[in-house]
Amino acid sequence: MGPVAGDRVLKRRRQYDEDDVRVRPGRGSRPRTKVRPKHTEAVEGFVFGVDRGRYQCRVDGPNGPVDVVAMSARELARKSIILGDRVGIVGDTSGRPGTLARIVKVAPRHGELRRTADDDDSTERVIVTNVDQLVVVSALADPPPSTGFIDRCIVAAFDADIDILLCLTKADIGGDMIGDIESYYADLDLDFVVCAPDEPITGLSDTLRDKVSVFIGHSGVGKSTLVNRLVPGAGRSTGVVSAIGKGRHTSTNAIALELPDGGWIVDTPGVRSFGLAHVSADSLLLAFGDLAEVATDCPRGCDHTGASGDCALDTLVDAEGDPPQRLVSYRRLLESMSGRD
């Protein structure tokens, strides 16, 4: 008997089996672990160039040194890689064009040369790490030497616990200034080297051999010219000094260049300022070693500005009331840094 009109027609429900079930794996289904690979097979390398997340590294290959392009491995997270770093590299380290290796380790650092844009800027910038010495290049003329800038570099080198060398250029046109500079720094154990365009630079080469040295100085002082003489084929851009006595920027990026007789030099872009916001007031005084000895006679809590009237540094002022230039420079830096907090 057929169904009566209006009656509900009952349908048999379909029976499902395991072939009809599809399970989509959810996120995080893979087992996680905090154990990271030790990368015991990592090759040691030296970072001599940095360019937009790619690092040029020198490694020892089976047939001699090889230059490898590498990127930072994800497991390093936000750990930065800096020019001069000693790193561990895995992957393709053949150095063939188009290959890319991975940096998985960064060795402990020493000698980090830091600067800030200004004395009241809290953002530190690490220029280079694992440095042996800082070479401050200053022209004796065109542009004239800036003892204030040199003093800042000395403070930064002292704070980083690295050696410092003062390289005076353009002695052919400013030789009469050599005595003034040497007199200014007579109380410091500061090494000098004097260079002229038509004279050998053997003395400078000897102090750089087998070390990692950073060249720093205002634009136009002849820094890139020196680099080109020390490293034939370096091709660092050089320029002239403008009519207002300030050098035009020529080099635009920091890079480490290997010296023919061993060692590396880091050529930095010409800088007009060297902020010291990262240096404490105590470290600043210790960098002026000649003044620090006198300051031991200061009363407890002396700020060494001379405002209190009983600062031992005031004993250095002569009978006419003129303080020595070193004291003027120190107190000028101290005043500039006092407002950074």
Image (spheres, rainbow, N blue to C red):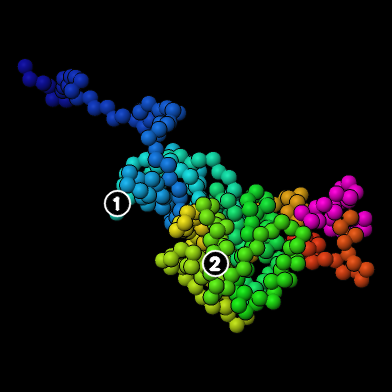
Q: Which is the main secondary structure of the residues drawn in magenta?
A: loop
Give the label, 2 or 1, closer to the camera: 2
Instruction: State the residue position of label 1.
Output: 96
* Percent of width and height locating residue 149: 67, 65
**Can see residue 121?**
no
* Percent of width and height locating residue 48: 46, 53
**Can see residue 200?**
yes
Instruction: State the residue position of label 2.
Output: 201
Instruction: Give the residue at the far bottom of this rendering.
Output: 243
Label whose residue precedes the other's in the sequence (2 or 1): 1
In the rendered image, the quadrant that contains the N terminus is: top left
The secondary structure type at the circle numbered 2 is loop
* Percent of width and height locating residue 306: 87, 59
Q: Is residue 111 left or right of residue 177?
A: left
The stretch drawn in magenta includes residue 278: no
Residue positioned 54% across, 64% down in the render: 202
Q: Which residues are drawn in magenta?
A: 289-311
Residue positioned 38% across, 45% down in the render: 60
Instruction: Give the residue at the far top of this rendering.
Output: 1
Closest to the observer, 107 or 176: 176
The secondary structure type at the circle numbered 1 is loop
The stretch drawn in magenta includes residue 295: yes
Q: Is residue 333 above or below residue 91?
A: below
